[in-house]
Image (tube, rainbow, N blue to C red):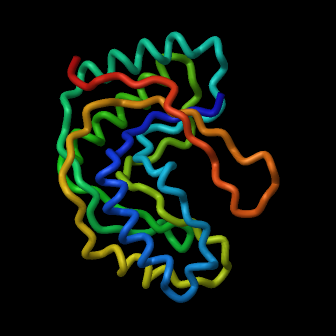
């Protein structure tokens, strides 16, 4: 199963971001981007890749333990940025140090469950809104379009384990499907 640990924003936060992203999709060049669907908007804490079924019980137990060690934290969607000329993302504000610690715990839980975590990078809280498949597309207008975005505050109350099902149809632009397979309350 292809899995990752995540924080999933509430519907109200998704609605706010969706209103802004609709404006971005009207900008010149927007049709050259692959826009992520709102159903897939999340903050990935740790990407696990293909996890064997035999590792799932241990991973579940360790993620549950990690969630208990972290208190709920305040968050809001705010601003945006890009990773080189490949990804446009919405940023976050609020309990970012606590969110980074939660990401570190989700990574450590996987390692302790025997899941290979190579390629681990410093955690940058972000929610991907678009990917660039064009060779020469300046993402600056899209990042500028998110610069003054500020959603309402909300409280992160759970750590989710999410399954990612990659498109199998071969249809251009088809999105991965995400399914929360387990979730644990923070601080309990």
Quadrant in the picture for the C terminus: top left
Point 18% across, 52% down: residue = 153
Q: Nearer the viewer, residue 97 or 73?
A: 73
Q: Nearer the viewer, residue 107 or 128?
A: 128
Check the image and report above or below for 136 versus 59: below
Q: Nearer the viewer, residue 79 or 114?
A: 79
Point 25% across, 25% down: residue = 186
Point 37% across, 68% down: residue = 19
Instruction: Please give left or right for residue 26 compared with residue 9 in the image.
Output: right
Residue, far bottom: 28
Quadrant in the picture for the N terminus: top right
Q: How many marks?
A: 0
Locate residue 109, reporting x and y percent.
Answer: 43, 22
Locate residue 58, reporting x and y percent.
Answer: 50, 11
Instruction: Please give left or right for residue 41 compared with residue 12 in the image.
Output: right
Locate residue 28, reporting x and y percent.
Answer: 53, 89
Point 69% across, 44% down: residue = 166
Check the image and report above or below for 58 versus 166: above
């Amino acid at each position: 199963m292809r899995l990752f640990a995540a924080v999933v924003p509430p519907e109200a936060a998704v609605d706010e971001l969706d209103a802004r992203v609709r404006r971005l999709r009207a900008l010149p060049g927007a049709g050259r981007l692959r826009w992520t669907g709102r159903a897939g908007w999340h903050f990935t804490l740790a990407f696990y890749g293909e996890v064997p079924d035999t590792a799932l019980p241990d991973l579940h137990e360790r993620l549950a333990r990690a969630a208990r060690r972290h208190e709920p934290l305040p968050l809001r969607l705010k601003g945006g940025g890009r990773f080189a000329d490949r990804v446009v993302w919405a940023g976050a504000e609020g309990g970012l140090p606590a969110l980074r610690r939660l990401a570190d715990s989700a990574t450590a839980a996987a390692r302790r469950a025997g899941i290979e975590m190579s390629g681990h990078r410093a955690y940058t809280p972000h929610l991907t809104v678009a990917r660039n498949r064009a060779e020469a597309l300046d993402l600056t207008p899209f990042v500028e379009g998110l610069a003054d975005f500020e959603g309402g505050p909300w409280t992160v109350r759970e750590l989710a384990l999410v399954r990612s099902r990659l498109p199998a149809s071969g249809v251009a632009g088809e999105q991965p499907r995400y399914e929360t397979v387990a979730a644990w309350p923070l601080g309990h």
